[in-house]
Image (spheres, rainbow, N blue to C red):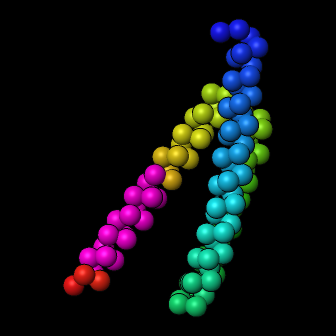
Amino acid sequence: MSDSSSEKREDELTRSAKEFAESLVKLVGVTGKTLLKGIEETFPELSKSAQEILSDLDKSLTDLFRSLDKATVSEQRELLSAYKKMLLVQLNKIEERLKRLDEQTDR
């Protein structure tokens, strides 16, 4: 692979990583607002804790986005792979919860 081709691939990976981080920040923002509204209406006593958790998550994602600018391609891949694994774990938990809710409504 030529140096030019390798640089283009690294630039593309960097751009993709930044786009992923931006999308993740937007998703957390929208999801967080919806979640907070539901918590405030249903469990007002949990509202402050939920806000703190979402604030911490937002800070983590902001730090991730900043670190991508300084990271090498291999560091970006490692970081994004770790976030992907975290998101997959969360997705599995959501799917399990939805399944339990479906089972409860079927009874």
**Residue 9 spot, x, y in % from top left:** 69, 23
Dividing the picture into quadrants, the one containing residue 94 is bottom left
Name, please, the residue furthest toward the top: 2
Is 100 one of the magenta-colored residues?
yes
Residue plotted at (62% across, 77% down):
34
Find the magenta span and give its range: 88-104
Is 65 one of the magenta-colored residues?
no
Question: Where 2 falls versus 77 (above or below)?
Answer: above
Dividing the picture into quadrants, the one containing residue 30 is bottom right
**Residue 14 spot, x, y in % from top left:** 72, 34
Dividing the picture into quadrants, the one containing residue 55 is bottom right
Name, please, the residue furthest toward the left: 107
**Residue 78 spot, x, y in % from top left:** 57, 35
Left or right for 48, reference 94: right
Q: Is residue 76 visible?
A: yes
Left or right for 84, reference 31: left
Q: Is residue 56 visible?
A: no
**Image quadrant for the N terminus?**
top right
Residue plotted at (38% across, 64% down):
95
Question: In front: 5, or 21?
Answer: 5
Residue plotted at (66% across, 75% down):
33
Question: Where 63 falls versus 81 (above or below)?
Answer: below
Question: In front: 68, or 23?
Answer: 23
**Image quadrant for the C terminus?**
bottom left
Magenta: main secondary structure equals helix
Residue plotted at (56% across, 47% down):
83
